[in-house]
Amino acid sequence: MTDIVLEARSVSHRYPQFSGWLRRPIGVVRAVDGVTCELAQGERLGLVGESGCGKTTLAKILGGLLVPTEGEVRLRGASWAALRGAAYRQARALAQFIFQDPMGSLNPRLTVEQALREPLLIHGLAQGAACRARVEELLASVQLPAAIRHRLPRELSGGERQRVGIARALATDPKVLICDEPIASLDVSVGAQILELLRELSQQRRLALLFISHDLRAVACLCTRVSVMRRGRFLETAPTDTLLSHPRHPYTQLLIRCASLDLDAVDTLPE
Amino acid sequence: MALLSVEHLSVSYRHRDTLVRAVDDVSFVIEAGEVLALVGESGSGKSSVALALARLLPPRAVISGRAALKETSLLDASEETLRAIRGGTIAYVFQDPATSLNPVMTIGAQLLEAIVWHTPAGHEEARRLAVWWLRQVGIPMPELRLRAYPHQLSGGMQQRVCLAMALAARPSLLVADEPTTALDVTIQVQILRLLRDLQRRLNLSVLLISHDLTVVERIAHRVGVMSGGRLAESGAVDQVLHRPAHAATQALLRARSAMSFKT
C-alpha cells in the first residue's frame, strides 16, 4: 500500500533501572518490546492497554519524541533517526500530539490566540493578518467561537481546553495525529463530543489518528482498527468489529468483559 | 427510622466577596443495608454532599440544612463528636488510594490505628483483626503485608487496604467517593465486585459517589441524579435508568450509549 504514513519496525525501548544511593544499575524495563505497526492515511488506529503497558512510550517513539533503543520508525518513508535540521522540523509539523491534560499542555500565561500562533510562527506558515485569519479558521475547525481567542486556559472548560489543544495540533496541517488519552480527564458527555470531533477531522482531512486509551469503549467508538497492548507487546491487532466479535487473545476477551463492568469477568482475588 | 437522613442540605463556597452555591437544597435518606448512589457530572455537587456529612469540607465552605446518622446530628456536631464520626461511624474510601494512605507508615500501623482508635479492641486483638480484614478484602499473605509500605503495593492493592481500613472501624455508613475511577479497568471490576460482595455479606450501608451509570447499576439499590447542585431525580436504580424523568438523567444515559459497544 502506498498511503502508509507511519510505520514502525521491531521497535523496542528499554529503560535502565537503578537502585540504592549509589544508583547501581539493577536491570532494564522493556517498556516497548518488538512492536511492528503501520498507520495509513485517514485510518484511526486505537491502542488499548492498562497503565504501564508501554502505550505512552510507544506513542512518543512513533511521534519522534523518543529514540527507540532498537528498531526504526518511518514517517512517510523517512526514518526519524535520519532526519536533521529543516527536514526534521518539517517532519515535526507532520506528526502532532494531543495529550491527556490540556491544562498541563497549554501554557497558562498564553491566550488561546497566542497558543495557536506559536506553531504558525515557528514553522513559518503565516504572518500578520494571515496569521489571525488562520487562528479563526483553526478555532472554527474545532467548533469554538472566534471570541474565545482572547481567553486564558484557566478561563476555559475542560472540553474547550482540549479543543484548543486539537486546534493547536492542526495548525501545522499534520498528516498524523497522536492522541494520548485525550478524553481521560473529561466528563463522559464531553469526551463523547471530542471523539465525534476527532472522527470528523480524520474523515475530512484524511488524517491518520493514533488514539491511545485505557478505555476500550472509547477506542471502539472511534477507531477503525484496534491493537491490544500488554507488557510492551502487541497481543493482537484487528478491525474493530472483528476484535469485539471474535477476540483471539484471552486478555482481549477479559478487557471486553471488563469494559462493560461484567463483575463475573474476574475473580475477587487478585492476579 | 432511616439510618441517615439529610434534609435541605446546601453547601456554598466563599469566593472573594461572594458565595458560590455547590449544593442546593438536597434531601435524601439511606436505610440500613442500602446502597444509595449519587451520580452526576463533575461539578454537580456530589462530592460536596459526601464530604459535608463528616464536615470534611474546607473552612471556606458554608453548610446549612440538617443531617442525622441514627440519633447523631452531624452538621452541628462538636469537634469531639466529629473525631469519633470521621473514619469511625462514617468511613470514607476516596478515588486515589495513593494519596489516602500515609506513605511513611506501614499498612499494619495504619490499620491498627483505625482499629484501636475506633473500636474497643486492645493491641493483640487489633492485630488479629487487621489480618482478618486484609483477608476479607482479598489480600494474599496478610501477615506479611502488615509490614509493607503503600508504595510497595499496586493501585488495586492500595485501594483494597483503604477499604479494609474503612471497614475495620465498623462504620455505620461507608462513603465511597469514586472508589474505582483511578484504577485500570480489570482492577476496577475486581474492586467493584469486592465492594458488592462485602456489602451483601456484612449488610453495609453505603453512599456511593460516581459519574458512571454502569458502576451505579452494578452495586446500588437507589440512585439520586445530581445536576447543578440539585437533586434532579431519585428512585430505585431500575426505575431511574429505564424511565428517566429528568433531562440530566437522559443526558447521562445518552453519553453512556454514545460510548458503548455491543458484544
Image: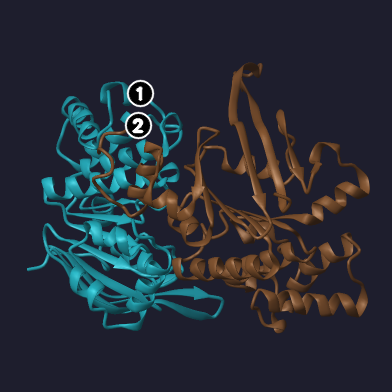
Chain colours: A brown, B cyan
Judging depth in this view, the residue of B250 and A42 nearest the camera is A42
Secondary structure under tag 2 reads helix
Instruction: Indicate which disc residue B107 carries.
Output: 2
Percent x, y for residue A147?
A: 71, 84
Q: Quadrant of residue A85?
A: top right
Residue type beneath disc 2: Ile
Residue placed under numbered mark 1 in the picture: B147
Residue type beneath disc 1: Arg
Above or below: residue A213 compared with residue B54: above
Judging depth in this view, the residue of A63 and B140 nearest the camera is A63
Judging depth in this view, the residue of B114 and A43 nearest the camera is A43
Secondary structure under tag 1 reads loop
Percent x, y for residue A12?
A: 65, 30
> Numbered disc 1: what chain?
B
Above or below: residue B162 compared with residue A121: above
Counting residues from the start of the chain, the first of labels 1 and 2 encountered is 2
Above or below: residue B3 compared with residue A264: below
Q: Quadrant of residue B63?
A: bottom left
Q: Residue furthest left?
A: B1
Asked if residue A28 can be seen in this view, the reply is yes
The C terminus of chain A lies in which quarter of the figure? Answer: top left
Asked if residue B6 can be seen in this view, the reply is no
Spatial separation of the CA atoms under disc 1 and disc 2: 6 Å
Percent x, y for residue A16?
A: 65, 24
Percent x, y for residue B227?
A: 37, 77
Dot 1 and dot 2 residues touching (CB under 8 Å) = yes
Q: Residue at the location (20% across, 27% down)? A: B123
Above or below: residue B48 compared with residue B204: below
